[in-house]
Image (cartoon, helix red, strand yellow):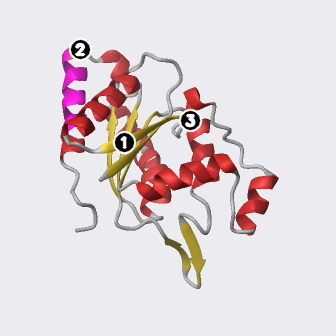
Amino acid sequence: MKACIVFAQEGKESFCHAILDRVTQTLQKQNIAYDVRDLYQMKFQPVFQAADMQKVSNGTASADVMTEQELISEADLLVMIYPVWWWSAPAILKGYIDRVFTNGFAFRYEAHGPVGLLKNKQAIVITTTRESEPEMKKTGFDDVVKKQIVDGSLSMIGYDVTYRNFAAVPYVDDAARQGMLAEVEGMVTAIHQPVGV
């Protein structure tokens, strides 16, 4: 089994980085090989440009996108880790999805709409917010965040997705954050091996 981790948090120290560390440590304990795609460290180019559209129309992709698509194809498990900004994913991650999960690779259009091509794969999506869970539920933004990436992207293209948002991260104490990291470990430990069985 193999995992691909797509990480979208700038800097080097954040709770998202702590989540990344716990995910990789747990994968190592499970003897699961993994690749980390740290989009900021990679300086990933997130803008879906006219040249990208032309390549998709021709059934191909630029070299950087083909590298990512190969890693995604090889991975049984996709892990996405990112902070929620403006009730959405950081632009660099949105651009990654736009450029990498393209028509003909991640899905295709049929008579009744798009059909996912990345089936028999699992995904874990972990987000963080400053807002508390009650605040998010009151405004309905908890559902907005889930629908964008989990339902509108990954589930649609075939993934079996486990999602967790850790709320009010800057305002909880260290014991609460340690509990969150323990939950992350539990999520990774609970994945099915082999996938699709």
Disc number lying in front (3 or 1): 1
Few, some or many residues within 10 Å of mark 3 (<14, 14–19, 20+): some
Residue 140 pos. (x, y %): 42, 45
Amino acid type at circle 2 is: Asp
Which circle's residue, 2 or 3, is located before the other in the chain? 3
Which circle's residue, 1 or 2, is located before the other in the chain? 1
- List the residue tagged with mark 2: 174
| Magenta region, residue range | 175-185
Amino acid type at circle 3 is: Pro
Question: What is the number of the mark on residue 3?
Answer: none
Residue 121 pos. (x, y %): 35, 61
In this view, the residue in front, 13 or 29, is: 29
Helix, strand, or loop for circle 3? loop
Could you tell me what secondary structure mostly forms the magenta stretch?
helix
Answer left or right for 163 relative to 28.
right
Q: CA distance from mark 2 to mark 3?
A: 25 Å
Answer left or right for 179 relative to 129.
left
Helix, strand, or loop for circle 2? helix
User: Which residue sits at x=47%, y=64%?
Assistant: 157
Amino acid type at circle 1 is: Tyr
Helix, strand, or loop for circle 1? strand
Few, some or many residues within 10 Å of mark 2 (<14, 14–19, 20+): few
User: Which residue sits at x=66%, y=41%?
Assistant: 46
- List the residue tagged with mark 3: 90
Which circle's residue, 3 or 1, is located before the other in the chain? 1
Q: Quadrant of residue 175?
A: top left
In this view, the residue in front, 122 or 166, is: 122
Q: Quadrant of residue 164?
A: top left
Few, some or many residues within 10 Å of mark 1 (<14, 14–19, 20+): some
Question: What is the number of the mark on residue 34?
Answer: 1
